[in-house]
Amino acid sequence: MMKMRWFRWVFIPALIVTIFLAAYPIVLIGKPDVRAEAVVLLDLRTGKVLMDVNGGKPLPSASMAKLMTELLVLEDVAAGKVNWSDEVTISRYASTVGGVNLSLRHGEFMTVSELFQSMVIYSANDAAVSLAEHLSGSEAAFVQRMNEKAAKIGLSNGTYFANASGAEQQELGLNHPANIHGNTRMTAADTAKLTSYLLSSHPEILSTSSLTQMELKGKGLYLSNTNWMLSSLDGPYSYTGTDGLKTGYTAEAGYCFTGTAEKNGKRLIAVVMGASSREERFEETRKLFDYGFDFEPSLKDRLLSWSYLAPELSEL
């Protein structure tokens, strides 16, 4: 009886571990040294955070706040509350908001589709304001929806939306409403969580965010994507599998980027906040992607995931 117990508790688990490690060898890879105020790397399928540096620190997010605006637009379209072909009248405020914009004129018309693509691809602030006003009647009402949605999907108190575009107070222009004031703050962890929700509930966003260029009909303008990591660009910063998602920059926020890439069925979300240059935010994201796609779970995690083969392993 004693020999049988010894065989069960020692030999069988050891045999399973040996077979498992032979089939799935462990690759030991150190976490990269990333230069930024905060970074988070998330595996979308498992929900596992693979890297977190200052992920819970509220920081200026610049145009990455538009991720929430994109989510609410897609939800309203899906619910039939708005159509892509609807025409939007550009307000005086929208026509004078600062930062990156389309130089829209007060009183002109743009479709919801044109404004949405301009916001996603080119990060236009005036497009974001116009969509907010069209969907909710005023940007203030839309901002209330943004913060309500943030609470609903479980974002922390460290994230607060002050406007639909992510513009800083000094960029809002002379015609901004009195009830649009203050600055948006987001944490890198919340940005990753919001992006995960956006991609899971509306994967069609990638069909827009992956476009390298769009034509703004009626203006004779071609807008290039601000995401230099798109694999379709085939440029010096391109990364295989990258198809989104959102860049951002203000003097206070520095250079920010929320990127997503997929390889062999594994999709990663990388958030970089407060990089020192346009190029650095993509270089640091590359480090995160390289680490994430080469990442192997710890021996303990892998054994626990296989513990159904031998319940005794869960006690190791």
Image (cartoon, rainbow, N blue to C red):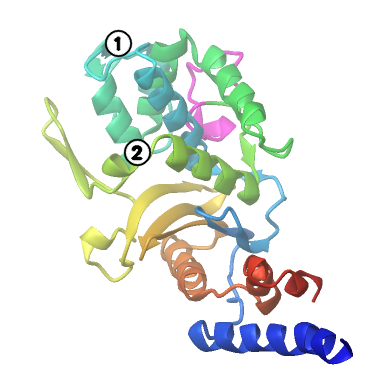
Query: Percent position (x, y) of residue 293?
Result: 46, 70
**Which numbered disc covers residue 157?**
none
Query: Percent position (x, y) of residue 90?
Result: 32, 14
Residue where numbered disc 2 is placed: 205
Q: Residue at x 55, y 12 (%)?
A: 141
Query: Percent position (x, y) of residue 21?
Result: 57, 86
* Residue 80 visible in image: yes
Taking the image as shown, residue 238 lies to the left or right of residue 68, namely left
**Which numbered disc covers residue 89?**
1
Q: Amino acid at mark 1?
A: Thr
What is the magenta range?
A: 164-181
Distance, label 2 to label 1, CA atoms, is 24 Å
Dominant secondary structure, magenta: loop
* Residue 130 visible in image: no
* Nearest to the observer: residue 156 or residue 140: 156
Q: Residue at x 51, y 45 (%)?
A: 196
Secondary structure type for disc 1 = strand
- Image quadrant for the N terminus? bottom right
